[in-house]
Structures are given as structure tokens and as C-alpha cells.
Image (cartoon, rainbow, N blue to C red):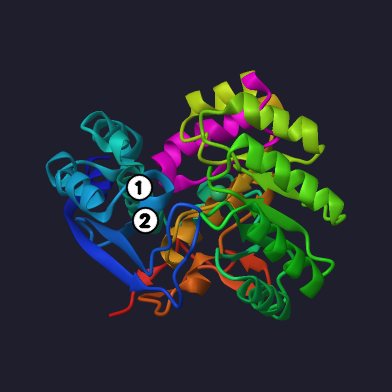
Amino acid sequence: MARVTAATLIRAIDVTPLDIPLRAPFGISGGAPAVANNVLLTVELVDGTRGWGEAAPLPPYNGETQAAALAALGTARTGLVGRDARAWRELAGEFRARGGARCGSAQCAIETALLDALTRHDGVPLGKFFGGAGTELETDMTVTTGSVDAAAAAAREIAMRGIRTIKVKIGDRLGVAHDLARVAAIREAVPGAPLILDGNAGLSRADASGFVRGLKARSIGPALLEQWLPKDDLAGMRALGEESGWLVAADESVSSAADARRVVAAGAAGVINIKLMKAGVIEALEVVAVARAAGLGLMIGGNVESILAMTVSACFAAGLGGFRFADLDTPWFLATNPFAGGYVTDGGRISVGAVAAGHGVCPRQ
Ligand SMILES: [Mg+2]
């Protein structure tokens, strides 16, 4: 027994910045980063098994920064080295109690690196660890904020890639009329594509009503209205769903299971966008439980993440099963890929079926 335990003791951890340039700025309502300033965490067990976790803070999404993630992860060594990775849940709880909860992306990196090391050691694919319900998802692809022409061109490119669902970032400073023109141009360029319109909490109630009227006047019916209103305006979110008759998703409004319960109690949304970067794997499992109990639809999303973190999210959603929407497209926006392995795609189909153990992603040497 002692020898089994010893093999999964944590020998070392390493924390390093992971800066990946984007092909073009990733514009959302709050800003447009040109580089993914992420963090790579490596956990090494005494038998030499290594596990990797990524923190992908996204300042215009929730204010988290690379500096905050580095600072939080810099404190992890003391709590992890010499401990048994099998106690991953306890170790993650200790990190959270030490302040990890204030930096969800750092919490996510700790939990995924521990789980990756442990499941690689055991020879178990991460999707099987999460339940093994399936190995495939269908992802959308995003049209970021920008000009009307750029939106139409991006939509045509997405369709040519064989991706069905188009997600459109709306709600930046250019206003409702500009966004309506973008959405209309996308609809004209790719008439059959289901549209997810993501406001990243950037619209006022008046803007939202105007947008709904404008879409209806153009006979455009989106598949999903994702977080148009500020995260605490749950009454407004409910009213938006009632006014439009369209499905509404909560994203920024739900970082924790407690947030998910508030959304349920307010009747604010029909779908919750779950992201491991918000508060880690353990909290995301709790959010899934709350959403399922309330009969809400599940969406898996992420920040601007490499193939590493997005493969973890794919393993999570495919392994648990029942996710209606997937938005795991950001590796396509990165100019370089510092990793080998991970999910494979065919058009919008994502598969983690070939992952042999852990999440299957390793840094290129
Ligand atoms: Mg969103």
C-alpha cells in the first residue's frame, strides 16, 4: 500500500508564463487582446509522471490577469510538493482556501494539472475519469467584434471550414445599429447557420430591447442570446427571454454553484455556459449538478485558451455528456501551438477519443 501511495507523491511543480500571439485580436465587448497571456503549471510525480494545467485569465472577461494567476500559482509549491496527488480534491480545497478562489484560472490550472498527472499515472483518459459518456462534441466558431465586412468574411470562412454554428460577439462601443448590420451580413453570407449572439454583459436593457426588435424586423431568429446584460441583472435577463421568446444563456452571471442557484431562483436563463476557467473543475461539477437539477441546458465554453485547456474542457463536457452547446474554438485563433496532442477536429466536430491518458497534451520539446 505504501509503495502505491509513494508513486503518486508530488516531487516538483513548475509555473511559467505561457504567452501565445493571436492571428488577430480577439474582440469582445470589453476589449480585444492580441496575445493570450496565460500560465502553464507542471506537476511532476516521484515516478516521473508529469501533468499539465493551464490558467487562461482574460482581463476583459472578468478582470483576472496573468500577473494575478502567476502570483496565485507561485504560492502553490508549499502546499503541493511532498503531498499525494490522489488527494487532488483535498489539495485543490486547500489551494482555494489559501486564496485560489480569488483567481479562478489559477484554481483551474491546479486542478487540471493534478488530475492530468493522476490519470496519466493510472493510464485513464480524462474523459473516462469524468464519466465516459462520450468522446465527441460539436463546437461553434466565433466572429469577434469588428467591421461589418470582416464579420461577413469571417462567417464565410467558418462555413467553409465545415462549422455549422456561428457565435457572434456583440455589445462593444459601436452600438446596436452596427451590431445589427454585422449580424444581418452574417445571416446573408451563411443563411442556414444557427447564431449564438454573445454580448459579454455589454448591453443595457434598452440596447437589448432595440436589438431584439431589430432582429425580428429582419426575420432573424438566433439560436441563443448569451449574456447580453450585466451579470447581476437577472431580472433583466428573465425579461429578455420573455420579451424575445428566444433561449437565453447565463455566462458572466455564473462563476459558482451559488451563482447558478441564483439564476435558477430568478428564472433568468435556460442555459448556463460552464467554463473551467471561472473557478476550476470541482466548482464546474457543482454548477453542472445545479443546472441539471433545474432542467437547464448545458454549454461548455472557455477563455482564450490553448489546445491544452480546451481539451480538458472537451474531456469534461464529452465525458459528462448532455452538453447542448460547445464553444471550444480558441485554439484556431492562436498563431502558434506550443503543444502536441489534444482534441482532433473535423469541421466543427471535436473528438477526444484518441486521448490515451490524462488530457493527452504535452509541451513540444
Ligand atoms: Mg460568453
Q: x%, y% of residue 333?
A: 49, 72
Please tell me whether residue 153 is drawn above or below residue 257 in the rendered image.
below
Q: Which amino acid does the dot numbered 1 rest on?
A: Ser
The residue where tag 1 is placed is 105
Does residue 289 show up magenta in the picture? yes
- Give the overall secondary structure of the magenta segment: helix
From the viewer's perspective, is 239 left or right of 279? Answer: right
Compare residues 40 and 354 and report the one nearer the observer.
40
Disc 1 versus disc 2: distance between alpha carbons? 6 Å
Q: x%, y% of residue 240?
A: 71, 34
- Residue sitting at 39 percent across and 64 percent down? 33
Compare residues 359 and 210 and report the one nearer the observer.
210
- Residue sitting at 35 percent across and 35 percent down? 89
Which secondary structure, mark 2?
loop
Please tell me whether residue 22 is drawn above or below residue 285 in the rendered image.
below
Does residue 281 show up magenta in the picture? yes
State whether residue 75 appears in this view. yes
The magenta span reads 266-291
- Please tell me the numbered disc located at residue 56: 2
Compare residues 174 and 352 and report the one nearer the observer.
174
From the viewer's perspective, is 98 left or right of 245? Answer: left
Compare residues 301 and 126 and report the one nearer the observer.
301
Q: Which amino acid does the dot numbered 2 rest on?
A: Ala
Q: Earlier in the sequence, mark 1 or mark 2?
A: 2
Which secondary structure, mark 1?
helix
Q: x%, y% of residue 180?
A: 71, 58
From the viewer's perspective, is 233 left or right of 363? Answer: right
Q: x%, y% of residue 145?
A: 55, 63
Q: Are marks 1 and 2 in contact (CB under 8 Å)?
A: yes
